[in-house]
Image (cartoon, rainbow, N blue to C red):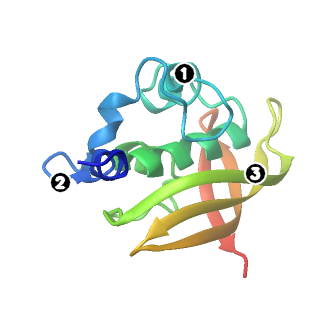
Amino acid sequence: MTAAAAAEQATRPDLRRGRHARIGDMSGTRMCPCGRGEAFDDCCGPVLNGKRAAATAEALMRSRYTAFAVGDTDYLRQSWHPRTRPAELELDPGQRWLFLEILRTADGGLFDETGLVEFVAHYRADGSRGALHEVSRFLRADGAWVYLDGEIEA
C-alpha cells in the first residue's frame, strides 16, 4: 500500500462508530486540524472532550471545524444553539476537510455576548477540491459560546 493510500484509508469514516476512524489518533503530538499550529491535545482536543470551554467565538469556530474534520457530530450538536440546532446531523463520509482560513472576526471576545467569524473551510469531496466561505454568528448561552447560524458567501 502506498503512503498516499494509507493516509487516505486513515481518514475514512468508521461507520460503526459514526465518527472518522482517525479521531482516536489525534492524541499526543498530532497537529490540530484547526490550523493554529498546536498539538490537538493543547488546542481543540480539550474543548471537544469537555475539559475546557471555548474562550472566544473564534475558538469555538476552530473547535467546530475540528469536529467536522474528525466527524464528532455529538460536539457539533452540543455547540449549536438550541433554537437553530438541527434535529439530526449526518456528515458526508466522502468529504475530507483540508484546512481552515479565518478571514476576520468581529466581537466574540472574552467579555462579548455575540460575535462573527468569517472563514473559508477547504475540503475534498468526490475527487475534487472545494471551499465553504461563511460568515458565522455566535452568541453566549448560559455563559458558553454556541454557533447560532451562518450565511454562505458566494
Q: Read off the residue under disc 3.
A: 102
Q: Is residue 85 left or right of residue 148?
A: left
Which one is nearer the viewer's eye here, 92 or 106?
92
Q: Is residue 63 left or right of residue 124?
A: right
Q: Read off the residue under disc 1.
A: 52
> Residue at coordinates 63% horizontally, 25% vertically from top-left?
38
Residue 75, position as x, y percentages in the image: 42, 42
Q: Is residue 113 left or right of residue 145?
A: right
Which one is nearer the viewer's eye here, 29 or 85?
29
> Residue at coordinates 63% horizontally, 46% vertically from top-left?
61
Residue 49, position as x, y percentages in the image: 41, 27
Which one is nearer the viewer's eye here, 30 or 47?
30
Q: Read off the residue under disc 2.
A: 15
Tell me which numbered mark, 1 or 3, is placed earlier along the sequence: 1
Identify the image quadrant of the C terminus: bottom right
Tell me which numbered mark, 2 or 3, is placed earlier along the sequence: 2
Q: Quadrant of residue 25?
A: top left
Q: Residues within 10 Å of mark 1 (few under 14, many from 20)?
A: few
Kind of element beneath mark 2:
loop
Kind of element beneath mark 1:
loop
Q: Amino acid at mark 3?
A: Ile
Q: Residues within 10 Å of mark 2 (few under 14, many from 20)?
A: few
